[in-house]
Amino acid sequence: MRMPRIQVYLPDDLYEAVKGRGLPASELLQRAVRVELKRLELLEAADGYLAELLAEVGEPTAEQVTEAHALADRLSRGAERAAG
């Protein structure tokens, strides 16, 4: 099976790092593209879910947004303390 080809240019520092470590550039690129495509797919799904949720329950009030930010801050600080 013939695989389509594209030409990719790397900055000198990346090229040297890949070659210096003997890494398979083509496999790395394929993996990176797959990861990015999956990331975009998940973002689109999250946007779709959020749109459905907003249609179902409506936009949050300013008070709810403030409470959510405060909760996120508390959780973040707790996680930082737990991580040490």
Image (spheres, helix red, strand yellow):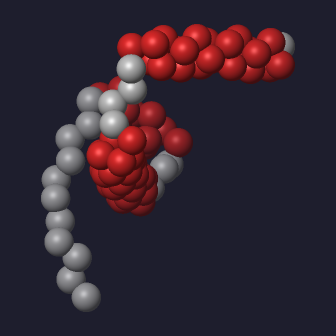
Side of 20 where 29 appears, left or right:
left
Side of 73 where 15 appears, left or right:
left
Please tell me which residue lies in front, 74 or 59. Answer: 59
Residue located at (58% from left, 11% from top): 70
Side of 22 where 58 appears, left or right:
left
Picture quadrant where residue 76 is located: top right
Quadrant including the N terminus: bottom left
Question: Looking at the picture, does residue 21 appear above or below residue 33?
Answer: above
Quadrant including the C terminus: top right
Residue located at (33% from left, 41% from top): 54
Question: Looking at the picture, does residue 37 appear above or below residue 54?
Answer: below
Q: Position of residue 15 (x, y in %)?
A: 34, 37
Q: Position of residue 26 (x, y in %)?
A: 35, 58
How many numbered marks are there?
A: 0
Please tell me which residue lies in front, 79 or 8. Answer: 79
Question: Looking at the picture, does residue 30 appear above or below residue 20?
Answer: below
Residue located at (74% from left, 20% from top): 79
- Asked if residue 74 shows in the view, the reply is yes
Q: Position of residue 56 (x, y in %)?
A: 36, 48
Question: Looking at the picture, does residue 4 appear above or below residue 38?
Answer: below
Picture quadrant where residue 67 is located: top right
